[in-house]
Amino acid sequence: MDTTDALVQLSFQVQRILTAVGAEHDLSVVQLRLLGVLRDRTPGMLELGRHLGLDKSSITGLVSRAEKRDLVRRLPSPHDGRGVLVELTPLGHRLTRQGAAEIDRRIAELTARMSAADRARLTALAAALVTPFPDA
Amino acid sequence: MDTTDALVQLSFQVQRILTAVGAEHDLSVVQLRLLGVLRDRTPGMLELGRHLGLDKSSITGLVSRAEKRDLVRRLPSPHDGRGVLVELTPLGHRLTRQGAAEIDRRIAELTARMSAADRARLTALAAALVTPFPDA
DNA sequence: TATTGTTATACTCTATAACTATA
DNA sequence: TATAGTTATAGAGTATAACAATA
């Protein structure tokens, strides 16, 4: 199997895990990412769009659907009368923690047949690909 | 960075590449996968659904949209009056080849800063995760 | 004027349920 | 009866363009 096949297939395998974990809580992968981004931030709508790679108009709907389920909350920006900040609700925090734990569990399961040394090698190599500035 | 973070982030990085390559030809990632599956098969609708992990009703629309763009063709099944086979058109074949080449190019770019030895290690480790029966 | 966010609109993608035609 | 596929319907997710409110 060549590099492209291996990385593309692994990518789909990981996405299937994310889809399955989300589905346990009736969350799409995008909603899972939304919760993940908000875990340690309270961004405005535009900043949220930059994190997720989505247009502001897409963010409006995404946040509104999550808000309707009491996963996130809109707050008026204290410094800009036009702005809105988005933060997790307690329920959103709980779901985020549960989802992260379940993803960890399933990734561990995926790599369970590997030796610890191979797993460490894979982690280091994958991390190198996604951190343009290796300090980050 | 831990294993989960590394694999999840790498997965999104690869998906972004697939999205970008698809977008060059106005194709979604799902449509790209459809073309990929048809590259060396002429399956029926149900079989196609199994390959893509989608319900048959989703396949109907997916194939119809691709057919409208002359990327695929429906054929009556020779052995079953109810069945339909799906195959690439010449245009579909051309797009599939172009897309695959472009994905290869971008994955090569992604791994360009790695040594050949590291790239081979990464490929082998990723392949091991996605091939439950290492012969396949 | 420029920026933040929402709304209107249109399309893709997906599933469930009901349907048609064939086996 | 069972299977292959389509249709009707509903909803998420996405972008573009036009808009309102604030800077």
Image: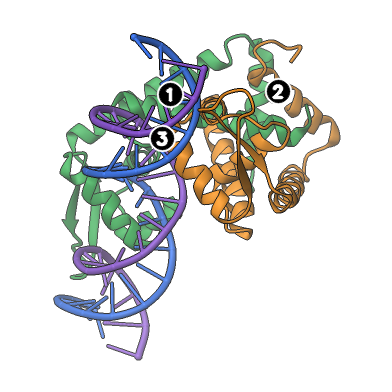
Chain colours: A orange, B green, C blue, D purple
> Could you tell me which residue is drawn at 19 percent across and 45 percent down?
B67
The quarter of the picture where residue B76 lies is bottom left
| N-term mark: 3 or 2 | 3
Using the numbered discs, state the Cα–Cα distance from disc 3 to disc 2 in whole angstroms.
32 Å
Instruction: Give amino acid for label 1.
Output: Ile
The residue located at (81%, 29%) in the rendering is A120
Establish if B83 lies above or below B103: below
Q: Amino acid at mark 2?
A: Ala
Q: Chain of mark 3?
A: A
Q: Compare residues C14 and A109 and report the one nearer the observer.
A: C14
Q: Determine which residue is flagged by label 1.
A: B103
Left or right: A64 with respect to A115?
left
Query: What amino acid is labelled 3 in the image?
Result: Ser
- Looking at the rendered image, the disc whose residue lies closer to the viewer, 1 or 2, is 2
Look at mark 3 in the image and give the residue it sits on.
A57
Q: Is residue B34 left or right of residue B18?
A: left
> Which label was assigned to residue A127?
2
CA–CA distance in space, label 1 to label 2: 20 Å
Please give the chain letter of the residue carrying mark 1. B
